[in-house]
Amino acid sequence: MGRRIEQNRTISNDRVRKIRKQKSKILIAAEGKNKTEKTYFSNFEDGKKTYNITYAKGNNTDPLKLVKMLVKEIKKMELDLQDGDVAYCIFDTDIDPDKNKIIDEAIQLAKKNNIKIITSSPCVELWFLLHYGYTTANMSSEEVIKRLKKFYPKYEKNVNIYPDIIENLDKAIERAKKLEKYQLDNNRRIGTVEANPNTEIYKIVEYLIKKG
């Protein structure tokens, strides 16, 4: 009897370890204090999900420094990017052409470390704006936010906009893909200042939805 109980406990513990291992870790790093991104992606967190989302600490606004910081966080957290874990580095391109060189260096370093780069041109608020409509207008960050506030007057960096726009999520994904194709068809490289407007946030959203 004692041996059977011990065996059952061993099997049970193995199953628990297996379940824990199946929960992949998703590490997200964004510019500044992560307020906008963390507020948005917190809506995808749930104890029942097959993943856990963690946000890298730091206030870097330089894309290259952001990637370097993320590399350290990956090692610290012991993420296995070859076996289910994922690391995302999110940043805005803004509108200064001088930023392209730093972005290129950040992208190259990210590739070497299996980090997925997610850019928004000029800013992440474009992703929210696409929930309301499609546009190919070249804009500054201020102009994007101004347009967004016409549809969502109470928008601020710390406001959780997700519950109010989720019904248009599928349309936003469709518009983001259409916009990406538009930029590529016009020979503009995604992730550069010139590919304005464009946002790759949809890639994380689709991954989280599929991951479930």
Image (cartoon, rainbow, N blue to C red):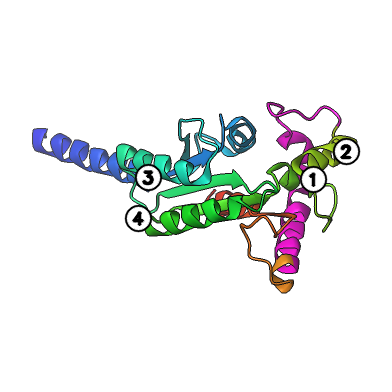
Horizontal placement of 150 versus 96: left or right? right
User: Label 4's element?
Assistant: loop
Which residue is labeled 2 in the image?
A: 151
Q: Where is 181 relative to 44, above or below?
A: below
Residue 26 location in percent, x, y? 46, 44
* C-alpha separation, residue under disc 4 versus residue under disc 2: 41 Å
Residue 178 belongs to magenta span: yes
Does the residue at mark 4 contact the one at mark 2 (Cβ under 8 Å)?
no
Q: Which residue is mark 3?
A: 71
- Discs 2, 1 touching: Cβ within 8 Å: yes
In the rendered image, residue 140, in percent from the top left (x then y), is placed at 77, 45
For image coordinates 18% across by 39% down, the residue present is 10
Q: Earlier in the sequence, mark 3 or mark 1?
A: 3
Mark 4 crowdedness (10 Å alpha carbons): few <14, some 14-19, many ≥20: few
- Closer to the camera, 105 or 168? 105
Residue that carries the numbered disc 4 in the rendered image: 83
Callouts 2 and 3 close, C-beta under 8 Å: no
Residue beneath label 1, please? 129
The type of residue carrying mark 4 is Asp
